[in-house]
Amino acid sequence: MRQKIVAGNWKMNKTLDDALALASELIGMVNDEVRGDVRIILCTPFPYLVPVARLVGNHAMISVGAQNCSEHEWGAYTGETSAPMLASLNTSHVILGHSERRQYFGENGKLLAAKVDAALKHGLTPIFCCGEPLEVRDRGEHEDLVRSQVEEGVFHLDADALKKLVIAYEPVWAIGTGKTASAQQAQDMHAVIRQQIATRYGQATADEISILYGGSVNAGNAKELFAGNDVDGGLVGGASLKSREFTEIVKSIL
Ligand code: PGA
């Protein structure tokens, strides 16, 4: 059975007090209401990783993740945060290749492959993001683009390393726009990614990798989106900033 995962991407939001309030509300709701096998990952801004992890403690279902890391381990890289630093904070996951990083910070496949390596080397689980802009989908080239993002970012890994990854398909036109992919569009692309992995690494490896959907997931559409055979959960932005709504999304995967 593939791990079901709902990850919240808090992006650059919340003061420390608000972040702690959100985390404690969430932990309370999960304790009271969530029964079943799901991994919940709170991807907070860097400064909140430690205080949020303290609140989470050794929770059976909840872990804490970062939203990015450097491809370098140590040294003179002012303003950067590295994988070994995150590992030393007990951060378990790190989002890599989010479309906002690709778009606003010029992150490309080669850089992301190096970041994936750095994360894995230090025991972090990368949540590797891929997804096409609208004009690419309109040209009918979305499958090709996503395949090339996956190939460039992670296909240098061997099967054992690849199995440690989580992949998130996030169509750029659906992120923060309120416009979601249809459940069929999500399932279709997830199947394409899984097939691509099966072709390269074998079906058994492909069957072990959780593939999440992201892009305007909310409490109203999560159940339908998560129903696809190849959809193993979600990467949730805006709706992860509201404890009640995020909890409802988590419950939709069970
Ligand atoms: P959204 O963001 O849910 O606000 O669309 C998703 C993401 O960027 O991970």
Image (cartoon, rainbow, N blue to C red):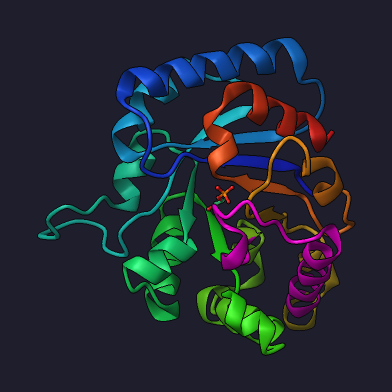
Q: Is residue 41 above or below residue 108?
A: above
The image position of residue 124, as x and y in percent, is: 47, 49
Residue 232, compared with residue 27, is above or below; it is below
Residue 223 appears in the picture as rendered: yes
Residue 245, image x, y percentages: 66, 28
> Residue at point 33% right, 17% down?
17
Q: Nearer the viewer, residue 201 or 109?
A: 109
The quadrant holding residue 181 is bottom right
Residue in front for this viewpoint, 182 or 24: 182
Q: Which residue is pictured at 78% across the width and 76% down the height? A: 192
Q: Position of residue 211 (x, y in %)?
A: 71, 58
Numbered label tally:
0
Q: Residue at x 42, y 36 (%)?
A: 44
Q: Quadrant of the C terminus?
A: top right
Question: Left or right: 106 with respect to 174?
Answer: left
The image quarter in which residue 28 lies: top right
What secondary structure is the stretch in magenta mostly built from?
helix
Left or right: residue 37 compared with residue 216: right
Whether 43 is among the magenta residues is no
Q: Is residue 194 magenta?
A: yes
Q: Residue at x 42, y 70 (%)?
A: 112
Q: Magenta region: which residues?
A: 169-197
**Which of the 4 image quadrants contains residue 52?**
top left
Q: Position of residue 80 (x, y in %)?
A: 22, 54
